[in-house]
Amino acid sequence: MSRSSLDRRRFLRALGGAAASLPCFKMLERSAVGATEYPLRLLTLFTPHGTWLPYWRPQGTETDFSLVYEHSMLAALEPFKKKLLVVDGLDHRIAYESGGTGHGAGSVVPFTGAPQIANTDDSMGPSIEQFLADKLGGDTTLRSLRLGVGWSKSLSFTTAGKRLPSENRPWESFRLVFGDGGQAMPGNAAADAALRNQLGVVNALKAELDDLRLFPRLATEERTKLDEHMTALSDMERRLNGLANGKGCAAPTPLSAVDNPDAPDFVPAVSRAQNDVLTQAFACDITRFAALSYHGQGSEAPMPYAGVNMNTHLDVAHQVGDGKEEANLNLVKIHQWYAGEVAYLLKSLDSIREGDGTLLDHTMIVWSNELGDPAVHAHFNVPHVVAGGTNGRFRMGRYVRYNPVGGYDCGAIQPPVAGCSPGNRFAHLDAHNALLVAVLQAFGQDMQTFNAPAYAGALPGILA
């Protein structure tokens, strides 16, 4: 075969069977057809209790905003502001128009945008991370990963709308991802020997490509393709060296089993352990789609580690409002703790190098809630934060606001807003489905709706 025809088939045949065992082989294979970027990962993140918007909203303008001010819920995320998209003013319109509200709908709609099936715990459609895992998750060991902290259930749903379980025990999460004792990870003799063999394969392939690049009759396009392959091999070599040196992909220290991981005494350690497992599952490319849920919708568990020693549902969330500063500040403490855990995760992801960036640069985290105003179980103005570099798919480092008039039921009040009337009670709302559609489009899905055909289009101004 002529060396002037280095197409994908010949390139992969030249690599031989040894290269197919390399952990980054899929990345190398993509480079053979001109796609050399690292894969985009998705994490859906759920925390309960609604919010109190005056202390959740950033201060400032779209691109010049601050998360640091008195009683700010999101202050812990200030160091990552350039990799945040704070989205204000989206509504769970589907909850109202399908007749499902409160905590029940709030445990279904955040990542599905689909109605809750009446009198069940199920949804009328899949969650976004399960939809994408079905489409794109076949190249990894785990199609998806679902983890929980505290008394929690997942917000992940299958194509048939069935709620999937989450693993709330971090020692079992570790076993699921890394095997008993992490035997597949660096530090194990067999794993280390395999790594040395893989590095040898990479070095041999680089030498072969160097020889091919010296061939005098290579056209410019073919020489460019060889350079792309060599870049991919160099990236792979760095990743494998990171494995061998204990950097990047490495099994975290497993948390010892306890009788009740949901007990308040253990929740902080459980949260950090679950985040460590999640980080390394992404770093080792064991999965690219994950969901993490904290507590459960309507959780009543006290949170002494956040400074709240009372029923967080009845004595805090249901009491917030104008002039109720004690309850408002207790809700601030709850969300500050959640934001601190998110900041820990972002820092962990950002500490792992990938190519010219970090693992955080190649991750998208969509953080949502069950409610807006928890005192009245409102699905108006539900808080949303997108975090990570998103592989450049979203325009990050911004605070964007939609539906500036605010949320309300036009059957009860009729301000002078187009489309707002007793006969059209929720048509003025900005359905959060548009954010879900934007996420799917960022992952290459040619879609205009998701689980709700009446709401078409991606959220404007989000995609890069």
Image (cartoon, helix red, strand yellow):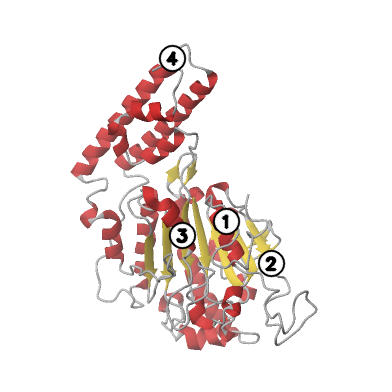
Residue at the outermost left position: 189
Residue at image x 48%, y 84%? Answer: 313
For marks 3 and 2, give the CA distance. Answer: 26 Å
Q: Which mark is residue 378?
A: none
Mark 3 falls on what kind of element?
Answer: helix
Residue at image x 48%, y 74%? Answer: 108
Type of amino acid under label 4: Leu
Mark 4 falls on what kind of element?
Answer: loop
Residue 77: give x, y in percent of width and height.
Answer: 54, 61
For marks 1 and 4, give the CA distance. Answer: 45 Å
3 vs 2, front mark: 3
Q: Which residue is mark 4?
A: 214
Mark 1 falls on what kind of element?
Answer: loop
Mark 1 Cα shell of 10 Å, populated few (<14), some (14-19), many (≥20): few
Q: Which residue is mark 2?
A: 402
Type of amino acid under label 2: Tyr
Q: Is residue 268 left or right of residue 58?
A: left
Instruction: Determine whether 157 is above or below 380 in the image.
Output: above
Instruction: Please report whichever mark, 3 or 4, sits nearer to the chain's N-terminal start.
Output: 3
Residue at image x 34%, y 28%? Answer: 13
Q: Which mark is residue 131?
A: 3
Mark 2 falls on what kind of element?
Answer: loop
For marks 1 and 3, give the CA distance. Answer: 12 Å
